[in-house]
Amino acid sequence: MSDSRSAGFTEVSVPEAYDRFMSRQLFEPWARELIAAAGVQTVGSVLDVATGTGTVARLIAAEVGEAGRVVGADISPAMLGIAAAKAAEPGSACIEYVECSATALAAADASFQLALCQQGLQFFPDRIAAVRELHRVLAPGGVAVASSWAAERPLGLFGPMVDTLSEFGITEPYPRAFDASSYALAVADLRELFESAGFRHVTVQTVELECVWETSHDAVATISGTPYGPLLAALPDAQRQRMYAALNDRLGGSKQGKLTVRTASNIARGVR
Ligand SMILES: C[S@@+](CC[C@H](N)C(=O)[O-])C[C@H]1O[C@@H](n2cnc3c(N)ncnc32)[C@H](O)[C@@H]1O
């Protein structure tokens, strides 16, 4: 995978729309699944890799409590800026946000008990290097949990997006940007990554979730919170509106009512 794919969330317009249209509707329900998959009762130090706007970091900070420590790491200063501006839940661990790559984490060896990474792997230029980094920063007995969209299932929200962009002849912003399969990992891929990085007791589960948007307008607007957002912003207004309408049709949106999208992730867990 290329570095340009990794930089897809650095454009300043993307994180705001990401947070408004996807954090609560899509990534928060998934963060609960990720944390549940960790299966740890008490944990004092957590690293959230590719934290984005900090959804996973905030939820785990509330579980860790005031005495603990949470670090959120991401390559995008714009995403981290939104994360850092959010108020913490009372009684939560303090969260420190750090700008760094998943393949060169700014963290000491064996310095965390739990390492999390939600929907980041598909953007990293070197996935095995990133999983090795999760292994390096965990103390012996520490747990790593990472998720990506499930390659064995349709790509929920993002499949209709890439199909619409292709249909309109938009130029890909980075190699394979409109290839749905490049955003998903299979159970076997995740297992191989975790085992190659040295994790023990590796398990990978496929989980399905129906995610709900208040209106189909909000579901369509998610596209402006993806690396495709700047492409749409550059289009003439009439063409952009036609694309929104086409995406709405693909998502099965109607003028009134909520819009539900079925999504599926593979969640890998391993012990250091
Ligand atoms: C789909 S978002 C997921 C964010 C967050 N985990 C969540 O659940 O909302 C992908 C994130 O990966 C980050 N990212 C992409 N490449 C990265 C890299 N090489 N190192 C660290 N973060 C990276 C992006 O900046 C973006 O915030």
Image (cartoon, grey):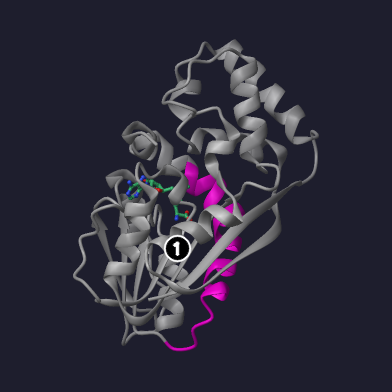
Query: On the rendered structure, is 101 left or right of 197?
Result: left
**Of the pair 80 and 36, the residue shown nearer to us:** 36
- Main SS, magenta region, reads helix
Horizontal and vertical percent position of residue 118: 48, 58
**Of the pair 55 and 48, the residue shown nearer to us:** 48
Horizontal and vertical percent position of residue 70: 32, 73
Position of 34 relative to 217 (above/below) = below
Q: Secondary structure at mark 1?
A: helix
For mark 1, what is the residue? Answer: 194
Query: On the rendered structure, is 41 left or right of 153?
Result: left
Query: On the rendered structure, is 241 left or right of 230?
Result: right
Position of 201 relative to 157 (above/below) = below
Can residue 257 be seen from the camera position used here? Answer: yes
Q: Which residues are magenta?
A: 18-42
User: Residue at coordinates 67% horizontally, 62% vertically from top-left?
Assistant: 207
Rendered image quadrant of residue 84: bottom left
User: Residue at coordinates 33% horizontally, 38% vertically from top-left?
Assistant: 10
Mark 1: amino acid: Phe
Horizontal and vertical percent position of residue 186: 59, 51
Dot 1: within a 10 Å radius of its alpha carbon, few (fewer than 14), some, or many (20 or more) residues? many
